[in-house]
Amino acid sequence: MSITLQRRAIAAAVLLIIAAAGFAIWQFEQTLKTGRVVNIALAPLDPRSIMQGDYMALAYAIDRELPEDAAQYKYAWLSVDAEQRASLHSLSNSIPQEPQLVAVLLRWRDGIISVGPNAFFFAEGTGAQYEQAPYGQFRVDASGKALLVGLLDENLQLLGENNR
């Protein structure tokens, strides 16, 4: 292979990587802009990680309701009330057709199945305002991908600097 051909192949590979990264970022931005708002109750968990600094370990009340055979399913179907608070409806391998239900992709985390991420990072020194947060707010896209937007207080108001 000639040097010119190698350079072209490397340039094409770099452009492909940049395009793929840009598309992934665009998808995340679209979910944050247009995804359905879902507020999921948090479950009590040790609120701080001493080793990782300003970070809160998260667990979800819905995770404790998942049946033992949850690993065979792809989605948790959530019922959402008027204030967008979610409760577990059922599990399935497909997206629900009922508009009142929201599908959230199930995640494997340390051998445990969950509806959300296991951590929330915040600015240094601001941890106290998040410690008693009863809800996590998510934006969920049509494919079930859920992105954590922030933590909420008991009145479903965003806490901290994400409070916009």
Image (cartoon, grey):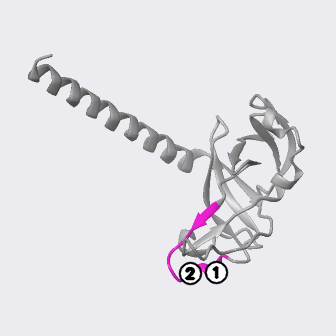
* Quarter location, residue 108: top right
In reply to whether residue 74 is colored magenta, the answer given is no
Quarter assignment of residue 122: bottom right
Left or right: 20 as drawn, with respect to 144: left
Residue 154 lies, with reference to residue 103, above or below; the image says below
Going by the picture, which residue comes out furthest to the top?
1
- Amino acid type shown at disc 1: Gln
Question: CB of mark 2 within 8 Å of CB of mark 1?
Answer: yes
Identify the secondary structure beneath mark 2: loop
Q: Label 2 sits on what residue type?
A: Thr
In magenta stretch: residue 126: yes
Give the residue displayed 89% in from the left and 51% down from the top. Answer: 65
Counting from the top left corner in percent of width and height, residue 70 is at 83, 39
In front: 1, or 131?
Answer: 1
Q: Which quarter of the figure is the N terminus placed in?
A: top left
- Pointer 2 residue: 126
Residue drawn at (34%, 35%), measured in percent from left and top?
A: 17
In the displayed structure, 80 sits above or below 143; it is below
- Please say whether residue 95 is visible from this viewpoint: yes
Q: Residues within 10 Å of mark 2 (few under 14, many from 20)?
A: few
- Using residue 30 as the reference point, say whether residue 66 is left or right of it: right
Tell me what residue is drawn at x 76 percent, y 72 percent.
Answer: 155
Specify the segment rendered in magenta.
119-130
Q: Nearer the viewer, residue 16 or 157?
A: 16
- Residue that numbered label 1 is attached to: 129
